[in-house]
Amino acid sequence: MRLIKAELHNYRQHVDLDVQFAGNVIAIIGANGSGKSNFQGALQFALTGEQPGFTRSDILNWGAARRGEGGYVRLWFTHAGHDCLVERRIENAGCALTVDGEKITGAKKVEEELLKLGIEKEMFRQSVFVRQAETDACLFDEPRVKEMNFQKLIGLAQAATIRKNLQTYLSSLPAAENYDDAIRQSEQQLKEAEDRLVETTALRDTTSAKLLNLPKQADILAMIAQGESSIQQINDARRAKAAIDEATRQLEASGDVFELAEKQPPSRGDFNPTLDRAKLDAMRQWREYNTKMPLLKEALSEVEKDAQELEKEGKPEDMNGEIQALSDSINKKLGAQSVLRGFLDKCPAGASVCPLCGSTVAYDIKEHLLKRIAEADVTAEKAKHDELLRKANDLRQKILLAASRFSSAKMALDKAQAGMDVIMKAHPDVATYDEAALLKRIDDAKNADAAASAEAARIANARREAQRLQAAAMAAEKAFEPYSGWDFSRLDSDETGIKAQMEEQRKLLDQRIDLDREASRLSGIVATLTDQTNDLVKAINGLKSKNEANKVFARREEILEHVRDWFDYRNGPRKAMRQRLEELVSGINAYLDKFCAPFIVEAGEEGVDLRIVFTEKDDVPAEPPPATMLSGGQKMALAISFRFACYEMFSDKLGLLVLDEPTAYLDAQTVDRFGDLLRTIKTIAQNMDLQILVATHETAISDSFDSVIRIGK
């Protein structure tokens, strides 16, 4: 892996930070508290989605969080021949990965693609992003802490938890059951069912053999149907013979019917009842008009006389002038009264001048006005006006009634005259008609018509009966044609023989049906027994499978118990730590040799303790000192060798290593000793194609790096 560029926005104290990575060994320089560790954490967050010890709300810049803003980390890098860009949002789980120009979004898909590229989170936790304090805890802390951190380093920190969980799981497993008794019982039931199956199958086969010796059911039914058809034909022949005999008898007995059918319907005579009824009606109407005409003329004359008398009373129009004059006078006096009453209301008491006419009076003016109002009284005139108006209205009603009576009388007279004219035009000699003679002719015509109708009906009925008899005879003859050659004397004996054959066939059919039912019943029993045997076989196989599964389960439980015992710290984890420790010691010594250190390390007899063994005789102390007693430069060489050995053990193919504060073991006078180690580190980085980031607060050695990233001011 080769880092190229990083952008940080609102990550902890880094509001906007844009850096470039150039060279193999790159310094990250900044004072204490400037954000070097957070910069490393941002790189780890970009590559793994997490920064140990912090949540997303912790790493979001406090000011940005208050303003409701978000943040992100973008990291450009190359890995395994691919150009990559990873971007992770801080305020949510949003992330994106671009590989060779193809963009992938979504946390799950991004993690899957990083795994395909060979970038695992565990690599970064174990060997790339390791804090100085974690290195010190593995090398220079007390034994218990060193052992705990070493377990975490090699992935055995959860050994005790795993052992406890395995023990809990094993305790929860149910006891294995033994199904041998159930298998023996089921096998006994299977044998009994198989014996019954063999016995029932034999009975079914015997019944089936009997069925084979009988005619087929379809053949039996066909023979029965043929017999029924023959019986039906015999009955049809009998009915046809009886029908033709009956038709012949009826023809012989119906000679008078055919004789009547040959006659013609009688004539109705020379009567014309329609004309006679018309003459009778005309004569009766003519008589009615002759009776009404004088009465109508007399009524019209009386109406004319009443009209003449009414004219003497005068015309309503002549009264209109006098009525209008009275109406005008009344309205004028009423208006004057209204004016006088108005003045009366306004006139002050004791006034002597009339406000209307201006005359002077010797008494109170109110009395004067009241006198004037009395002089304008309209009671008499109004009574006369109403009387004249009533007379005029009564006269109008009389005139209208007289006109209506005259119109009605004249209309009735004209209608009667018109009816008389119509009758005289149609029947000029109506006056000579004899009502009795006309009534007799009408009655004679009715009687003659009834007699003729009755005779015609008799002839029509005779003709229909003759046609029916002929048709019945023809139908009987046609129906008898198929049996004309039959010997009817043998029909009874033939019918008896056919019925006997049919009875034999029905017995065979009943026998076959009974055998079919028995065979079906036995087949059902065979099927049931077969199902029972199959179910028993399945049950036995299931019980055997459960026994086998119990054996597998017991073996699995035994394996889990071995695994549980292995995770006991006294067993597997201790052995694994010792094995890893020996591998790690070999790697540390190899790098100590490259750094020309005057000592090597050896694994202690117990735990993860490292013993210092000096290689130069002049420097060898009487007893091997602990690592904590090394000088600052020696501690630095041991810590860097430890980091390189961890890198080779866990992530040698990743190509990235971060050294956190390697100069922390040196003081201001000895810091230049790091320059000697740095030259070796550059050589190692070049040979291993390794990009190394060195976080330090020492600015004096900045010129020794390939490039420098300065954090803070």
Image (cartoon, rainbow, N blue to C red):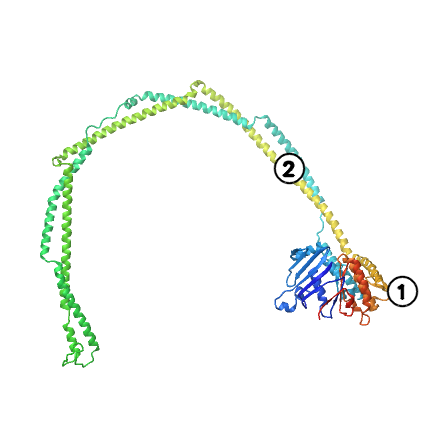
Estimate the spatial distance between the alpha carbons at disc 2 and disc 1, rounded to whole Å. 91 Å
- In percent of width and height, residue 540 lies at 69, 42
Residue count near mark 2 (Cα–Cα under 10 Å), binned few <14, some 14–19, many ≥20: some
Can see residue 622?
no
- Left or right relative to 257: residue 233: right
Residue count near mark 1 (Cα–Cα under 10 Å), binned few <14, some 14–19, many ≥20: few
Q: Residue at left 60%, top 27%? A: 212
The residue that disc 2 covers is 530
Nearer to us of marks 2 and 1 is: 1
Q: Residue at left 18%, top 70%? A: 334
Q: How many marks?
A: 2
Q: Nearer the viewer, residue 460 or 647?
A: 647
Mark 2 residue type? Thr
- Left or right relative to 213: residue 271: left
Q: Nearer the viewer, residue 141 or 11?
A: 11
Against 353, residue 225 (above or below) is above
Q: Secondary structure at mark 1?
A: loop
The residue that disc 1 covers is 616
Task: Choose the circle earlier in sequence order: 2 or 1.
Answer: 2
Against 247, residue 37 (above or below) is below
Mark 1 residue type? Glu
Q: Residue at left 51%, top 23%? A: 501
Q: Secondary structure at mark 2?
A: helix
Quadrant containing the C terminus is bottom right
- Left or right relative to 543: residue 386: left
- In percent of width and height, residue 54 lies at 69, 65
User: Would you identify the image quadrant in which residue 31 lies?
Assistant: bottom right
User: Would you identify the image quadrant in which residue 691 lies?
Assistant: bottom right
Against 196, residue 397 (above or below) is below
